[in-house]
Structures are given as C-alpha cells and as structure tokens.
Image: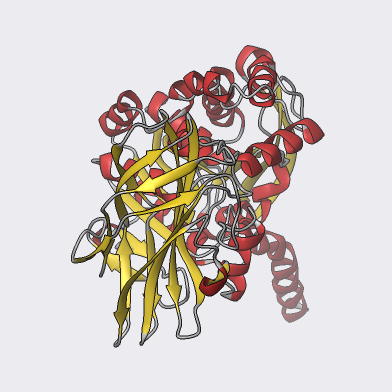
Amino acid sequence: MRRSLVLISVLLTTLLGAPAALAVVPGHQITYKSIPGVGGTALKALVVEPTGRGGGPFPLLVMPSSWAVPNIEYVGAAAKLAKESGYVVVSYTSRGFWDSGGQIDVAGPETVGDVSKVIDWAIANARADASKVGAAGISYGAGQSLLAAANDKRIKAAAALSTWTDLARSLYPNSTVNKQAVEVLLAAGKATGRPGPVLVEAEDAYRDGRFWEVVPISADRSAATATKIAQINANGTAVMLGNAWNDGMFAPGQIADFYGGLTGPKRLMLSPGDHATAELFGAAGLPNEIWESVGRWFDRYVKGTANGIDAEQPVRLKPNNGGAWRTFSSWPNANADTVQLDGRTIHAGWGTVADSGTILLSGALQGFLNIPTGVSLPFVDRTVAGVWSGPQYWNGATLAGTPKLKLTVTPSAETTTLFAYLYEVGPLGLGALITHKPVKLTGAGRTRTLDVELEPTVWNVGAGNRIALVIDTVDPRYLTESTRGSTVTFGPSSLTVPKA
C-alpha cells in the first residue's frame, strides 16, 4: 500500500511538473497592437515578446516598416531574435501606410518621432528595458532608425539596411533625377498609403520639371548632415550599415561617406544586389549573412554580450561579381591606376547600347545570378558616345574603392546630362557594367573641369580583361536633359581606378 502511494505521488509530481518544465523552454508570442504615435496617431504593430525567460525586463528592438510595406515585414527575424536572444521586438507599419493612421510625411518629424513613441509604449506595456534599446529597419525603416538615433539617446545601437543617408544625393545625384526610383516610390506610396502635403508637393514639382524645388526637404530627412552626424556621435550610438552595390534607389557612395563621419562603434557591409535584396530573406527569418551580423551587433551593443564583433574588421565588402567577403579596417583607399583620356567631340541627345540597367531588376540579377548589365563595346556608336580603353590586367585585378573622373568638357547646349559607365571588357568586346554615375552640365559654350566620383565598387577583373569607360548623354533610368543636335567636347581628361 505504502509503495503504491509512493508510485502515485511520483506520477502526480511528474505530470503536474511537466507544464512547468515546458514553460521554461524559450519561445515567443506575437500580438497585434495599436500604439499611439506622435499626436495620438494609431500605429499598428506586431509585438513579438520572448516566453520562457521570466518576467523581464527584456532588451528592446524597434523596427519601423519599409515604404509601402506593412508590419509583417520583420516578423520572421523578430521571432528568431525573441526566441533565441530574448528581445522584445516591435515591428510596426510606418505612419501613413496600410493599417496605420496619419499621412506619409517622407520621414518627417512625426514619422521619426513615432520611433520614440513606440519605445515609450514598449517600456510601459511590453516589459521592455529602457536601458537596452535598439532600432533597425530596411529602406524607409532604416532611414527612420538613423534619424531617430540622432534624436533619442536611449537608442544604443542602430542597424540600417538598404538605407539612405542623403536623400537628395540618392534621388537627385549630381542634379540628375533618378526617374525610375522616383516613379516607383510615388506609385507604391499612392497604392498603399495616404500621401501628405510634403509628398504631394514633391510630386507636383517633379511632374512640372521643378525637382530642384524638392531638394530643401532633404536636410531634415538625412542622417548625413553635419548636425545629425554630430548628434549620433555625441550619443555614442553603435551604427551598422548594410547596402547593395547596385542599389537603384540609395546608391552606396552616400553610405560610405556617412560611415566615414561616424566616430562611435560602426560596421559597414556592402554586397551584390539591388535595393533590399541582400537582406530580403533574413527579414523573413531565413539564414542570411546580413541579419546574422545584425543580431550579433545588437547582442554586443544593446544586450552587452561580449561576442567579439567589436574586434573584427569593421568594413566588410563582397565583390559585386562574386567572391568571398573582403575585410578592411577602414574604407579602402590604396593603390590606383590612372588612365589618360584623349579629347573628342560627340553629339548629344541620342542613346546608345550602354546604359545603367533597370532599377531593382538589373541589380537583383547581378546579386542572385551574377548576371551583369552588359554591353557590346563594338556596337557603341562613337558619334554619340566617347569610348576609352583602360589597362589590360593580364593576371587579373581587384578594383576596390571609388573610381574618379577628372573631365575637361565643353557643352554647346545650355543643359546637358552626361552618363559615365565603367566596364570590364573581354577579348570579344563584351562588357560587364562595374559602376556608373550621371552628371548634369549647364552653361552653353563654357569649358570647365569636373571632378566626378563614380559609385564605389569591389570588382574582380578576370585575367586578360581590360577596363573601359563609356560616356554618353541618355540613360533610361534617369531624367535626361540633353538636347538633340547639340555637342559635347571633351578635352584631355583622366580616369583613376582604385585597386585592392
């Protein structure tokens, strides 16, 4: 009898204790919440909280959604972060889009202020630790995270992926409208959200050919201004940046320059792909090199875990045409080849077979399949484009850094747009686009010398191949202001190409 009672007692203890044992296994729970943003505007959020880790408080990550994307965007990554590392993650729809209230103000004061309001709410309602806060996002959410990091000292670390740091430089490089990017943003904004006055006025100016009037809104919406960089540095915010070489909206040059101005803990990752493609699958919770670094970044600078990421080389660059990551202690600025460019005259206003490709598509093909934007150099019409051959690399070479042009040029028209393309060219004259850049000229008959930086790159040139430069006056990606019948005369100029 006594033995039976003992067996029954053991059995009951085991059965009753099983739920408690299961409860301590780390997991996560997701709830849909309405969070008051600036002015009480309802921001719809998916709040991911850790389970099986006690009562908290827990480190907090705030993730504003991308342009035209709802709050489900980061749930896969958020669930992984909550379950594996114990974060509370708030993934919310940015103001003016989908289920959130308000109007789109293009990362204006209210949208940026919403990040701080979400932090306030999570501390009060989701067991978040006020002393351990990070902000992260892709594209529009990334820009908000950087701007919020300048304003809110509670943000210990930020991870900005496929971000802009200088809005004007991104959409209006060298006074040339990135037409495809602007059209995509406008169409997506109107299809999924409610444009506010700033966006409506910006579109009106763009449609009327007055895009230069939009430029003044950039400063308050750009983390690369001297004031905002100083604020981020003063706050000691740890900043991780991840972008793609072929990002058709936010090209990498502005990212590299912003990185150079940061004095606190920082990390830069540039890899093949187009806008948001390099980190796309990581946001869904799938294995991804970029998001793995994001997790380690927050573990170190939000949670305070000594995981060694701060001892690694901070600049990590993956060649755009394939190969392993290359690491540097700072932005590469080593040896360079300089090519002298002889003078010539071309006719403006006609396109050639050389162009920069199609936004989102061309960069994605480069990133996922290593299919570059190509050209057949013999078919480039020399009457409407300048073509110059560079050195032949018999043993191959790795280009790493920012190629630079010093152009002496005289346009015959009052306004002309030039497009410079740098190619790797094989023995049959077939070229792969390495990088490019537009530049606008004004002043008919006026000769000037221009210093033009192409977008930075890391590119492995194959053995026996050479580089070549093409400059023409029309590109379908951009709003071209070249006049047919006019000419452009190039005087002696030079191209400088950095090598690793």
The x, y position of residue 373, in whole percent, is 57, 66
Residue 118, x across and y down, in percent: 58, 28
Q: Observer-nearest residue: 461 or 67?
A: 461
Identify the coloring.
secondary structure
In this rendering, the count of numbered labels is 0
Give the vertical position of 427 relative to 190 (above or below): below
The image quarter containing residue 39 is top right
In this orientation, which residue lies closer to the viewer: 124 or 196? Answer: 196
The C terminus - image quarter: bottom left
Q: Residue at x 53, y 21 (%)?
A: 113
Judge whether residue 262 can be spotted in this image.
Answer: no
Residue at left 46%, top 82%?
426
In the image, taking residue 369 as reference, residue 10 lies left or right, namely right
Residue 331 at x, y percent in the picture? 26, 56
Q: Can residue 384 be seen?
A: yes
Q: Quadrant of residue 254?
A: top left
The foreground one among 479 and 278 is 479
Note whether 202 is above or below 185 in the view shown.
above
Of all residues shown, which one is farthest toward the top? 39
Question: What is the quadrant of the N terminus in the image?
Answer: bottom right
Residue 236 lies in what quarter of the image?
top left
Residue at position x 31%, y 36% from top?
447
Q: Left or right of 104: which side holds 375?
A: left
Q: Position of residue 273 (x, y in %)?
A: 55, 62
Between 26 and 69, which is closer to the camera in this rendering?
A: 69
